[in-house]
Each structure stands twice: as C-alpha cells, then as structure tokens.
Amino acid sequence: MPPCVLRLLFALLLLSLLPLLQAAGDLPTMDSTSMGNCISAKKLCLDDFTCKVHFLHLETCFPFMASAPQKPENQEGCLEAAQQLQNSSLGSCRCQWRMKNQGICLAIYWTIHSTYGLGNYDLGGSPYKEIVISKPRKFNHLDLLESGSMSQSSPDLCMKSTTLCTLNDRCNKLRLAYGEVCSVARCQPLRCQQELRVFFEQVADNYAQALLFCPCEDGDDVCGARRRNNIAPSCASPAKDPPNCLMLWDTCLQDLLCRSRLADFQMYCCRMDPVGTCVGIQPQRCLKAYMGLIGTVMTPNYISNLSADVALSCSCQGSGNQLEECMRIQESFSKNPCLTKAIKAQMQVHHQLLSKSSPTAISQDSFQSLWDHSYSVHISQGNSLAGRLHPWVLTISLGSLTLVLLLLPVLGHL
C-alpha cells in the first residue's frame, strides 16, 4: 500500500476518534463528581480501617428502618463515631434527586447524620446536592400567543393548567395513573401516595407547578376545588380525624425518603430571622422542596377551596406538654412567610402566563417557551459522556471509523 494512502487512513482514524477521546478525558473521576455521592464515599470509607470501624459502629446506633430514632444506650460512643466520620469521605457526601439507588444513598447519609432529629426540630440540612436555579428574564407575550385547543372565554386558570397537562403525553399519562388509584371508588392510600410521588418526580416542573399553583379569582369555589383536588386529598390524606402533628412527624422520621424531603423543606423554606422574616430563600427552590413532600405522610395542601393558604392534614389536640413543639411543626407550613411568598410569586407567574392567552390560547410550545423565561429548576446530576456529546458528533465519529476499517482490507491489496 502506498505510504500516502497509509498516512491518509491514519489521519482519518485519528479524526474519527478525537471527539470520543476528548470527552473521555472529561469523565468524572472518584476525586471529583463521584466523591460527592454517599454510595461512592462509603466505598472509600470501607477501604480505610479506622473509617470502617467508626461507620460499622454507627450503623448499630440508629436502626432507622426498624423504629423511630431513639437515643442509643452508648450515646457518647455513637456521637464520637459520628464526629470522627465528619472528617472522612462521608462527611460532605450528598445524594441526588431522581438518582438510581436513592434509598441506599439516603440510608448512608442518615447513618452519618443520625444524631439530628433526636428530640430536636432541626434536621440539620438537606441530604440532596445543590440544585441550580436559572435567573429570570422578561416575558414576551406577543411571541407566545397562538391558537390552541383551550377555551377562549374561561376565566378558570386552573382549568387551563389542567388542559395543558392533558395535552402533554407524559403529564397526562402520569396524572391518569395516580387518578386511577386515588379516586374515591378505588382509593388505595399507599398506592395513591406512591403514584403522587412518581408524578411530581417525573413530570416537568412547569406542568407540575402550573397544576399546584394556578391562581383563582376570589370566591371561585370551582377553580379552588380543582386546584386543591390535584393531589387527591380525600384518598392521599383524608381530613376525617386528622392525626396529631407530632405523630405525623415521628412517622415521617422513620421513613428515609420522607425524612429527607422534610430536611430539604426545612433548609430551603424555613430560613427565618428571630422576628419571623424570611431570609435568603430562593422561591423556586422552596417550591421544589414543597413538591418533594407530596406523596409522603407530610403532604401539605390548601386549607380550603377558597384559600391559597396551605397546611398539613394534622392537628395539635391532645399534645399535652408538647403543644409548643406540635405548633412549631404545624406552623412551619401554615404560618411560613417564606413558603407563602414563594407560592404567591408562582401564582403571579401563572396568572401572567395563562390570563394573557385570551382571546387566543397558548399552545404547549408557547407554554414551554414562556416557562423557560421564568425561574426554573435544574437538577444537577453530574455530566455523563452521553450527555456532553451531541448525537451528530457520535454519528460522524463512528461512521468515519467504520469507513476506515472497511477500506483497510480493500486498500491492502493495492
């Protein structure tokens, strides 16, 4: 084979592999992205004798899945082990929303942070990694108004939000799924809560928040009922004989997911100064934490069809000398200025979006476009190789490599 042909083939081979090699160089290592994951951090800990001893000891201190966390017999030894692990790879590990093996990751996190919640209200911070909040930009309704399939005259903005979900295949499919097991005729409370969690975890935030935080006119009972019934309260959290909030709290702490979502809510919706003023809260991040509780025993909802105030489905009757603690739990939702501010701000966003769609209606693409110009939540899941490479880059690279390999036998006979 002539040398010039060999050089040409070699050059084509390098060009075809270059994008893949460059991306491979950016793959996360154990020292970067994986280090923040509690599952990977545990593996590193178990490779170290001292870290392993402290971790295995701490696992025996708080059997969360068996009962509510009680103070262990050897409390000092457990606290010492927890303190020692703060300086290990486990000390700063976190979990990710929607990650695979989320339950395993959360179990590791709460083993390390098991001392939080022992008779205290503060759970010590969120077990989840930071979520990036994009900055808002101005709306441009003139570019968004198109003809669609929604009623041009209906003032019920919650009806419009429901229609938008119906027009989206994924939103409609998941909404029908929880609607089936949450209906009055077929109510299965545990299945209902599970399907609610699936809905609010898997549906895009713009559709989920449009359903939950659609605005209603004062006195509009029909609109308010539609908004309040979005989470099927008659099945998921029936109001008859509501449990004591302290009991609800203890039940939540026994469940790793509920405990984690509650800690996330505390961190991002309950930052208040001594006089009760909301401090440093990002409204969209607070709403994300709020939605994370839906489908758990701590599911909040609107107190009535005619109110935009929210509360837990529990009471403080019979709390005895723990009345103050019970009221604190209850008022973290019903009298939370950070949460109230976030909900009102989101309702204003949807009022601006949906009320402008008359006399023409707003299509799904328009809805997505406008949402992209408002606050939105992006879950940081770590960059994978597939996520960084555009499909056309992979196609060209693999196509070129295949061509080179096919030509080699043919040109070898020249």
Image (cartoon, rainbow, N blue to C red):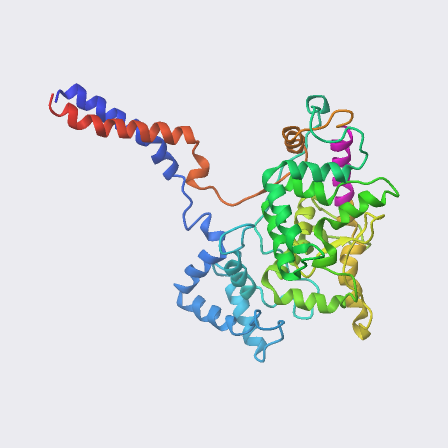
Q: Is residue 129 magenta?
A: no
Residue 38: where, in percent of width, then height?
Answer: 49, 57
Residue 177: where, in percent of width, then height?
Answer: 61, 50
Instruction: Check the image and name the residue furthest to the bottom.
Output: 73
Report the quarter where the C terminus lies: top left
Q: Does the magenta stretch include residue 343?
A: yes
Please identify the quarter of the rendering in which residue 407 is found.
Answer: top left
Could you tell me what secondary structure mostly forms the magenta stretch? helix
Q: Nearer the viewer, residue 231 or 243?
A: 231
Report the quarter where the N terminus lies: top left
Residue 204 visible somewhere in the drawing: no
Please state the extent of the stretch shown in magenta in the rendering: 342-356
Left or right: 22 in relation to 335: left
- Residue drawn at (66%, 33%) of the image: 371
Q: Which of 311 and 271 is in front in this view?
A: 311
- Residue drawn at (45%, 61%) of the image: 42
Residue 291: where, in percent of width, then height?
Answer: 67, 50
Is residue 412 positioned above or below 304 on the image?
A: above
Left or right: 17 in relation to 31: left
Residue 300 visible somewhere in the drawing: yes
Instruction: Check the image and name the residue furthest to the right.
Output: 219
Instruction: Check the image and name the residue furthest to the front.
Output: 185
Residue 175: where, in percent of width, then height?
Answer: 64, 46
Count of numbered circles on the image: 0
Please identify the quarter of the rendering in which residue 409 is found.
Answer: top left
Is residue 314 positioned above or below 381 on the image?
A: below
- Residue drawn at (58%, 80%) of the image: 73
- Residue drawn at (45%, 36%) of the image: 388
Left or right: 399 in relation to 108: left
